[in-house]
Amino acid sequence: MNKIKTALVAMLLMTYSASHARDEQDNRAMTDDARYNIEMQATTSGGMTPLWLNANRHGLSSLDKFNGYVRAGIMRPLRADSLRRWGIGYGVDVALPVNFTSNVVVQQAFAEVRWLHGALTVGSKEYPMELKNNSLSSGSQTLGINARPVPQVRLALPDYWTLPFANGWLHLKGHVSYGMMTDDGWQHEFTDRKSKYADNVLYHSKAGYIKIGNEDVFCPFSIELGLEMASTFGGTGYKLDNDGNMVAIEGEKGLKGLWHAFIPGGSDKTDGDIYANASGNQLGSWLLRMNWDAETWRLSVYADKYFEDHSAMFQLDYDGYGSGEEWNEKKKNRYLLYDFKDIMLGAELDFKYDNWINGVVFEYIYSKYQSGPVYHDRTPSISDHIGGNDNFYNHGVYTGWQHWGQVIGNPLYRSPIYNDDGTIRVADSRFMAFHLGVDGRPFEGFSYRVLASWQEGLGTYDEPYDDVHHNVSFLVEGRYSFRNRVLDGWSIKGGYAMDFGKILGHNHGFQLTVAKTGLLNLKKKKK
């Protein structure tokens, strides 16, 4: 709690300082274009909170049968200074929850500056998914919107910057960040320190996206290519040894740890000298999106190819080691090409004018292969090198790709918060799923969305299910924004969702959200 208070005071001081800064050219206050938001939410369920009332909400959610929060925030986006060469943004967003994993949630607390196209952000901030529909998609496989934000220092080109060559056809954006996970206390409580957990873990992410297309000429086609990579590293992992004792495993720290997170290298202490892999938990996705932008509609198809190590990243592995005493020496020019089964494929159709249907998203996700079920490394008796059993979202030392019990990527990988055995692991990472999302704005002030997912899960290679498990989840949600003068800025949203099947169980629930938003006007009226 002291850390939370300290963070709040620091961010409020930064906000106060930023709000009193002045631009010498036009003397605009830094509170101009700042917006406030007050929100109250209540969820009641039979069983646990259904998936689509819990997932893809930046971790501000709970599985408890009854939960809710009161939330208040002040935000000033960088786009408020879009006419300047530089810009200042900030935000404080705090929730007081009921039946959450925390008594107070500092959801966002950040300050950021921009110079020309580059931006530097310090603190916790909710970042959207790239190259996907944030409202209708099931979620990105690497940098998703399912878990609480990680406090970080982030240097970015947040919007596409048109490169000064190629006649306006080439655009670039991306980011590099370092931060620290904040869920140590939750891990201690969830595991009772009797199963694997990790303290003081550091976080790193980086991404780059290239867009080929030119809106200034008549060319409706564009293509976007991206690479997202992330890592958890450093800190201290704790896991049981063969005798049932909890042992500490120190992660790589200092400048070497930071560098090996940026350029994968080094090794974990559990790797040994022969089977040295990159230190920390390394993962990422290759992204592709192709768009056809017509006058009244836009059609896109996209792919998200997830990987956990270098073999899955390049789909290629060296397999030319010798035998006998030369079992660990490279003797042949031979390589192994892995299958391309594990992938997310999606299609999105958007209509540009409000109607009963404005957007449709359909996605297919497959993660059963994971480089195959065979052994991870060669041995003196088995010279073939096949790096199988990648165990998506899990890791041998760290608690996997999760924060506060929610996976950071796609929530169809069942989050550790669902586990009832006190273990922090993704128990259903090998699955196939279909997902459909539809939204619309049939009349002024009203919008809706429908999400539906079907999933077939096998568990993991190490702990498979006894039989194939299935799950169906759906959500129907409507939102009305009041337009009259008395209730301007108020909105009300209601959603009903259900789960059926063995993966998540049988759940049903209703969620009601009331919110008020508007411009923060702190200017004194002239007499």
Image (cartoon, rainbow, N blue to C red):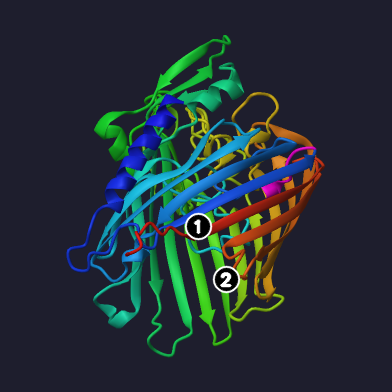
Looking at the image, is 4 positioned above or below residue 160? Answer: above
Q: Which mark is residue 129?
A: 1
Reading the image, the residue beneath label 2 is 301
Q: Residues within 10 Å of mark 2 (few under 14, many from 20)?
A: some
Asked if one can make out residue 54 in the rendered structure from this viewpoint, the answer is no
Residue 374, percent across and down? 60, 37
Q: Residues within 10 Å of mark 1 (few under 14, many from 20)?
A: some
- Please give the name of the residue rendered at 52% of the width and 39% of the height, measured from the top-left corner: 401
Looking at the image, is 515 positioned above or below residue 171? Answer: above
Residue 483, percent across and down? 62, 70
Nearer-the-camera pick, 42 or 172: 42
Q: Is residue 33 left or right of residue 197?
A: left
Q: Is residue 130 left or right of residue 70?
A: left
Asked if one can make out residue 165 in the rendered structure from this viewpoint, the answer is yes
Dividing the picture into quarters, in which one does residue 133 lie? bottom right
Nearer-the-camera pick, 502 or 524: 524
- Please give the name of the residue rendered at 35% of the width and 65% of the height, measured from the top-left corner: 80
Asked if the stretch drawn in magenta spans residue 203, the answer is no
Quote the CA–CA distance across marks 1 and 2. Answer: 16 Å
Looking at the image, is 443 positioned above or below residue 512? Answer: below
Seen as rendered, the residue at the extreme front is: 527
Magenta segment, which residues? 47-53
Q: Which mark is residue 140?
A: none
Q: Of the residues under marks 1 and 2, which one precedes in the sequence? A: 1
Nearer-the-camera pick, 43 or 54: 43
Residue 315, percent across and down? 49, 52
| Marks 1, 2: nearer the viewer | 1
Q: Amino acid at mark 1?
A: Met
